[in-house]
């Protein structure tokens, strides 16, 4: 196995530019790449956090992917953070709707859940599953 990631959550947004701004400003993601369509919508974007990455783009109903994804609803993404208290404070200061406050879980994680403007849940915490040995 290589150090390359194998799984990339991919989301579609009606307002992809707004989602990119939220992910960067409130959640601390770093913009890796943003490619716009001729009409100003987002064809493809990549944002990183730690050693993980999400991809996103503008919701469209054209093309094979657009037709297949047109009725998708909100999703949930989990992100491991080193300091959930500081991360929570940044998100709250950024105006993000917190739907589950900071919680110490029975399984050892400290986490919280936020909802973005289009209904997706973003879960941030210290729980970090380990990959099985090769």
Image (cartoon, rainbow, N blue to C red):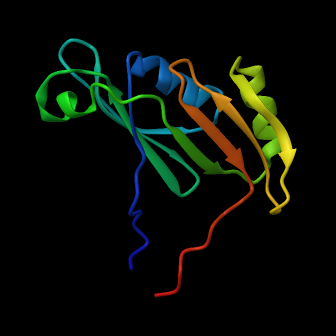
- Residue ID at (36%, 30%): 72
Q: Residue furthest left?
A: 63
> Where 127 sits versus 73, above or below?
below
Residue 13 sits above or below residue 132 on the image: above
Residue 123 placement (x, y as % from top left): 65, 42
Q: Picture coordinates of residue 52 (x, y %)?
A: 51, 54
**Viewer-side residue, 58 vs 35:** 58
Residue lying furthest top = 39
Residue name at image x 55 percent, y 43 percent: 77
Quadrant of residue 5 in the image?
bottom left
Q: Is residue 113 left or right of residue 63?
A: right
Image coordinates of residue 44 in percent, x first then y, are 29, 34
Vertical position of residue 79 compared to residue 41: above or below: below
Where residue 134 appears, as percent x and y from the top left, is: 46, 88
State the quadrant of the N terminus.
bottom left
131 with respect to 94 (left or right) = left
Q: Is residue 3 above or below residue 80?
A: below
User: Viewer-proximal residue, 71 or 17?
Assistant: 71
Please state which of residues 52 and 106 is positioned toward the viewer in this rendering: 106
Q: Residue at x 29, y 17 (%)?
A: 41
């Amino acid at each position: 196995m290589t150090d390359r990631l194998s799984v990339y959550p991919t989301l579609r947004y009606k307002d992809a530019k707004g989602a990119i701004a939220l992910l960067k400003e409130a959640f601390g993601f770093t913009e890796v790449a943003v490619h716009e369509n001729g009409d100003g919508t987002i064809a493809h974007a990549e944002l990183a956090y730690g050693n993980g990455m999400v991809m996103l783009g503008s919701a469209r109903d054209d093309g094979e992917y657009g037709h297949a994804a047109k009725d998708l609803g909100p999703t949930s993404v989990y992100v491991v953070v080193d300091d959930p208290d500081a991360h929570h404070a940044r998100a709250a200061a950024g105006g993000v709707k917190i739907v589950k406050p900071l919680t110490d879980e029975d399984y050892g994680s400290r986490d919280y859940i936020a909802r973005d403007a289009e209904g997706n849940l973003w879960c941030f915490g210290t729980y970090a599953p380990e990959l099985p040995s090769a």
